[in-house]
Image: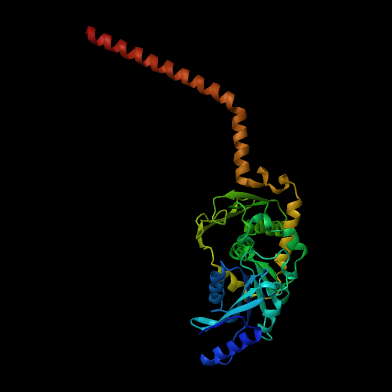
Amino acid sequence: MIIDLTDTTSSEIASALLKARRNAGSPAMGMVGTIVVVVDEASHHDAMKAANEAGREHPSRVLVAILRPGRGASGLDAEVRVGEGIPGEAVLLRLHGELAKVPESVITPLLLPDSPVIVWWPGGGPRVPAEDPLGRLGRRRVTDAAATRRASVDYNARAEGYAPGDTDFAWTRLTPWRALMAAALDQYPTKVTGAEVAAAKGNPSADLMAAWLQSRLKVPVEQRNSRGPGVTAVRLFTPSGPIALTRPDGAIATFSVPGQPDRPVALKRRTTSELLSEELRRLDPDDVYARTLATMVERDALPDDAKKVGDTARKSTAAKVTAAGKKVVAAKKPELVKKTAAQKSAAKKTVAKKTVAKKAVAKKAAKR
């Protein structure tokens, strides 16, 4: 059921939601929270679709706010959707003029009582989410650093203004990567001498992955550019060889551990709705993300040399032994060369003597 409201109010929207539920035969709400989506006109369709798909796992009231500040008259237009394949409720709000500068005055009366609020900015997000007027309403504030230009993501401000409940899809995308690397060290406990992260240029998830590895392992972490898509490889250098997780195609990864056969791992790039569903499962503060942000600020202050892994840290014990053997061979090479030349000369003389002997035998046979 779809109800269009023009030049309306929050009270009329709430009444329309109640009417739509009754007409659909479900007067009880049965929803677990409210998802507030702050988006522009161009991308509101994809954002609403992702929120509704996430609602199949977490039925919620979805409030999509399109802010249109300007000199025109203040106004509020709404589109209420209940049913039609939507697991919860969806309201599309267009705020015009001065009203767009105070969106919290429209959103607050429409929040479900006694339930968590998740605020999501699909287009990137404010500089400090917790200080945003709508961000203050949320128990969870979700941004997406990959949706905006890399230069506009101020991680120093994000770290300084961090509040419990802040998170970013760039961090959510790393959940399977972090789980696999942590499991590798649990199954194969060893000393890590350095790490490396390869990803497409300007990928914010790679920055967060490098900061997380440095904060947990206390070793230098180097970042390398690749063709993508996204993060393509994470390597931990150990004395026995590298522990590597490589994903060149964005779908299937190869998990490599020293002394064991390589294993394929399903590591598909997840959709926006899957990322949002993960964030809805956990509403408590993410302390690991907070520490990673702090480490990221520390990495920005380090010189470039301090963020590179040296050749010594990269080489395993076997590689060092092989290198040492090559040095010994190189040191003895002149003597070996002389010995080989003498052997070749002696071999030529032997062949020459045999040839002369054969000719002499042939001459004797001819005379007879």
For residue 10, what is the image quadrant? bottom right
Is the residue 91 above or below the residue 350 in the image?
A: below
Q: Position of residue 354 (x, y in %)?
A: 36, 16
Residue 138 visible in rendering: no
Please give the count of numbered marks on the rendered protein: 0
- The residue closer to the viewer here, 338 or 137, is 137
Instruction: Tell whether 53 sits left or right of 354.
Output: right
Which colour style is shown? rainbow
Q: Position of residue 104 (x, y in %)?
A: 70, 77
Is the residue 277 above or below the residue 367 in the image?
A: below
Instruction: Tell whether 344 sits left or right of 259.
Output: left
Outermost residue, left side: 368
Instruction: Tell whether 255 sits left or right of 145.
Output: left
- The residue closer to the viewer here, 186 or 351, is 186
Taking the spot 71% from the left edge, 79% from the top edge, the residue there is 105
Outermost residue, front side: 72
Outermost residue, top side: 367
Is the residue 242 above or below the residue 367 in the image?
A: below
Residue 345 visible in rendering: yes
- The residue closer to the viewer here, 52 or 268, is 52
**Which corner quadrant holds the C terminus?**
top left
For residue 92, what is the image quadrant? bottom right
Q: Position of residue 124 (x, y in %)?
A: 64, 64
Q: Position of residue 56 (x, y in %)?
A: 53, 79
Taking the spot 57% from the left edge, 57% from the top edge, the residue there is 230
Taking the spot 58% from the left edge, 65% from the top edge, the residue there is 176
